[in-house]
Amino acid sequence: MTLDQIRIFLCVADLCHVTRAAERLNLTQSAVSASIAALERQYDVTLFDRVGRGIRLSETGALLATAARRLAGEAEATRALLQDLSRTPRGRLRIWASQTVASYWLTPHMMRMHAAFPRVELTLHPGNSAEVAQAVVDGEADLGLVEGVAPGGALTVREVGHDELLLILPRCHPLARKPRLGAEEYRAMQWLLREPGSGTRTVFEDHLAAMGLATGDLDAALQLPTNEAILDGVRASGCVSMLSWRSVRQARHRGLAMRRITWAPRPRRAFLALTHAGRAQTRALTQFLGLLDAQ
């Protein structure tokens, strides 16, 4: 088994499509098919089940995918270490970031890094906070950036920024101008929520707990996976939500009202940088973390 075979297998496993995997890897379809077939033949296993005109991971394939991701992560770390032996930061820095961080905070810092170290290839993959933390653990990300509560486990955590949630509601909402809101008003409003696992959802749940509430006490109309979807939903209905001020600072012109929380502890949160405690940091990663610390 070679690292190229692992790379091809993981790409097919991610896409569940040989042709698309070949396009992503810049290989021919026959080369990708031959690589998978060679693995199956060498170890006498079936890695993919054929379902109609498509494929999906077999039980054996799913087990291999878990181990292969760890192996690919270690191989990438080894490659990065070899590149890091030179004095000038170079190579690739794989960043995963939660939606709020990626969309409203991170880009200027990545541009500064590119200007200072143009030989470093920066890649960005968005996800929710739980997905980002797992990517760092699995070796798919060199650096994770999330908001909210620090995850535990094999991760090293440092604060690199901060944020605050605001109550978002239509300007015409009957509670838009009420000075103070309590648990009774929260129960009376219809809510749009971010999905479990997102940093926004976690901080919102902490805010509810400070008011003696839980999400189960609310009239939740929908759970939506993006800030933009929630803003559109609030604009199109009488629902309310809580989102990062960074994601809604332009919403004032779209028929929405933004209210800072003054009737309970403010739902503040830190932006956190996550790295793997058991892996050596490359020069590129060290330089980028220093740039974030110096903001």
Image (spheres, rainbow, N blue to C red):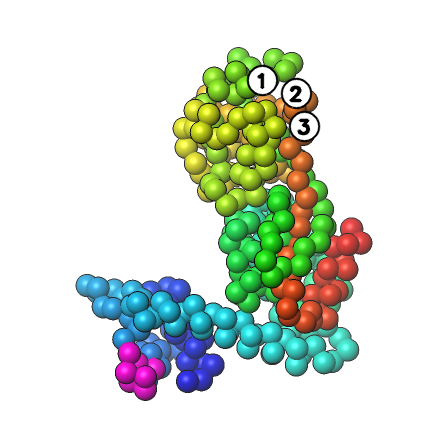
Q: Residues within 10 Å of mark 3 (few under 14, many from 20)?
A: few
Are circles 1 and 2 on residues that touch, CB within 8 Å? yes
Q: CA distance from mark 3 to mark 2?
A: 7 Å
Q: Is residue 37 above or below residue 210?
A: below
Tell me residue 64's x, y (percent): 39, 72
The answer to which of marks 1 and 2 sits earlier in the sequence is 1
Image quarter (top left, top right, bottom left or bottom right) of the N terminus:
bottom left
Mark 2: secondary structure: loop
Taking the image as drawn, is residue 248 in sight? no
Amino acid type, mark 2: Trp
The region drawn magenta spans 39-45
Pinpoint residue 102: horizontal percent, then vertical percent: 60, 50
Residue 185 visible somewhere in the drawing: yes
Three-letter code for the amino acid on which mark 3 is drawn: Pro
Residue 42 shown in magenta: yes
Which residue is at 56% across, 56% downward?
133
Residue 263's tag is 2
> Upstream in the sequence, badge 1 or badge 3?
1
Mark 2, Cα crowd under 10 Å, few <14 / some 14-19 / many 20+, is few
Dividing the picture into quadrants, the one containing residue 282 is: bottom right
